[in-house]
Image: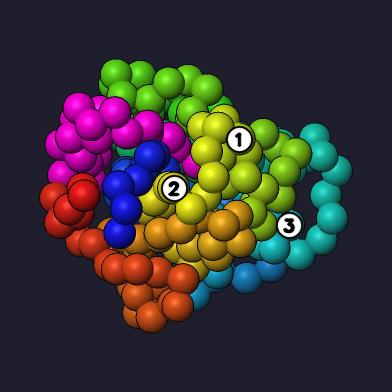
Amino acid sequence: MKTARALIFDFNGTLFWDTAYHQKAWASIAEKYGKSPYTEGQMHMLNGRTNSETIAFLVGEKLPPGQVKAISEEKERLYIDMCRSSMPLSLAPGAVSLFERARKRGIKLAIATSAGPDNMQWYKRWFSLSSYFADHLIITDDSRRAGKPDPAIYLETLAALELEGSSCIVFEDTKNGILSASRAGIGTIYAIASDGADIGTTEAMGETHGLLSGFDQFVLE
């Protein structure tokens, strides 16, 4: 494998292993507004989708934009409260070391996440992300583009990097995220075996080049 010019990371479930917090928050939303309980199978199916897409699935009907926004904000308050009650938080094993190694070699770093900009402000504060990622290379949900597996977010990230997908490596924990990166022409994709990830599915996908249980396992060539 040629030396990568950029490393692109999904965030939730990849750099920050927070799947359990999201699952509990969405389960509360499903209980309050949904047509059925929120199951693990639904979680794997919806991972990487935007909040509005997830709400549409759970509620089972088209809601006015204002109500979708209110439910999304309610879910994120539940999630952030769970994160704050679990402080101190940390990034995935080996992540910071990989950031440092990449930076020394002049390799760009980017984030492509379905998280919204408000949550990203918390993450920047908790994990000092600005020490490693330029603001314009942290791509969040803009409430306009389609969620993963649509390639839009990775195409936007490549444009921000000013690079071709063949020169980049992506790290993702979900089927939707892996498909999104592949459809954007990313050259190399690694699945992350974080807590709660659908490892059996992501490891078996033809689009993935390996499975990592921590970033300390990744050899930067």
Residue 122 position within the rendered picture, expressed as x and y whole percent measured from the top left: 40, 25
Residue drawn 49% across the image and 62% down it: 178
Closer to the camera: disc 3 or disc 2? 2
- Which badge, 3 or 2, comes first in the chain's sequence? 3
Which portion, as a residue range, is magenta? 86-112
Query: Label 1: how many residues lie within 10 Å, few (<14), some (14-19) or many (20+)?
Result: few
The residue positioned farthest toward the front in the image shown = 2
Question: In the rendered image of this protein, does residue 134 appear above or below residue 177?
Answer: above
Q: Which mark is residue 159?
A: 1
Q: Is mark 1 on a helix, strand or loop?
A: helix
Residue drawn 71% across the image and 50% down it: 146
Q: Residue 167 carries which label?
A: 2
Q: Is residue 159 left or right of residue 196?
A: right
Question: In the rendered image of this protein, does residue 105 appear above or below residue 67?
Answer: above
- Which badge, 3 or 1, comes first in the chain's sequence? 3
Q: Does the magenta stretch include residue 63?
A: no
Q: In this view, does 43 lie to the left or right of 104?
A: right
Q: Is residue 218 left or right of residue 189?
A: left
Question: In the rendered image of this protein, does residue 100 appear above or below residue 67?
Answer: above
Residue 134 position within the rendered picture, expressed as x and y whole percent measured from the top left: 43, 21
Circle 3: residue type: Ala
- Label 3, on which residue? 56
For marks 2 and 1, give the CA distance: 13 Å
Query: Label 2: how many residues lie within 10 Å, few (<14), some (14-19) or many (20+)?
Result: some
Q: Is residue 105 magenta?
A: yes
